[in-house]
Amino acid sequence: EALAEANHLVLLSPTGTGKTVAFLLPILASLDPEVTEIQALILVPSRELAIQIETVVREMGTGYKVNSVYGGIPATKDKMAIKHRPAILIGTPGRVSDHIHYENFATEHIKTLVLDEFDKSLEIGFEDQMRDILQALPNVQRRILTSATQGVKIPFFVGLRNHTTVNYLDQGGESQLTIKRFLSPEKDKLETLVAALKHIGPQPGIVFCNYKDTIRRVSDYLEENGIGHGCFYGGMEQIDRERALVKFRNGTHQLIIATDLAARGLDIPELGFILHY
């Protein structure tokens, strides 16, 4: 109800609780089928999240055209895709900012702006691009910001005025998670990690690392110990990231080593465990 009525909304909800559908429904209800330009813009921090939201819109069978744009592929391919204007455009701030700079689409018909996982976009350095994008949107009437993090400061340039906040972060009920701590006798935790994985046994899981250099080091050690896995972090080529996710989802790999890029908005069902290295 708040999503349908509020013009400026901050939606705080844990990852995997349906935020995407929640903000898509009022967007779809507000689209004008007579308008042939982009009417809603959704900014996301990663290519994977852009693709995922695009897939959700297509699966809803709305009849409205939707496209996603992001780095890792030639911008000319984007330009061809959006030549026939979508009603909804999803993209990473860097690529969307480039398209606006080169006037590849009109912005005056964009009435709804969604900043999905906006704190993550700010964290990874998209603030300048986001500011440029907002300055290029003269007629935005509705702003929706989503996050899975409590207490994140909203930048002034977003232009929220008298906004409504819907907070589901503290309403998760009783947790079904079992939390365990593995103590490493050595500062180098690689042997402890392998021991923990063997203790947990064969089930799908994610090992989170803080840095991509750590991922490479962990990956090399797991490979030496015959533990199959994939890797997922921001410095990888898009095709390699997508391949890693496909292998993880189809069971080729039961383990993926990742930065927190994999924690934001990716649909990875039936996880058996998560290890924070």
Image: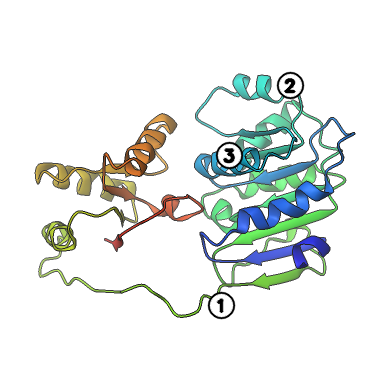
Lower sequence index among marks 2 and 3: 3
Q: Which mark is residue 55?
A: 3
Q: Amino acid at mark 1?
A: Gln
Which secondary structure lies at badge 3? helix
The quarter of the rendered structure image containing the C terminus is bottom left
Q: Amino acid at mark 3?
A: Thr
Q: Residues within 10 Å of mark 2 (few under 14, many from 20)?
A: few
Q: Nearer the viewer, mark 2 or mark 1?
A: 1
> Picture coordinates of residue 97 (x, y %)?
67, 36
Residue, disc 2: 83
- Dividing the picture into quadrants, the one containing residue 228 is top left
Q: Amino acid at mark 2?
A: Lys
Which secondary structure lies at badge 2? loop
Lower sequence index among marks 2 and 1: 2
> Picture coordinates of residue 196 (x, y %)?
16, 62
State the separation of the CA atoms marked 1 and 3: 28 Å
Say above or below: 30 vs 6.
above
Lower sequence index among marks 1 and 3: 3
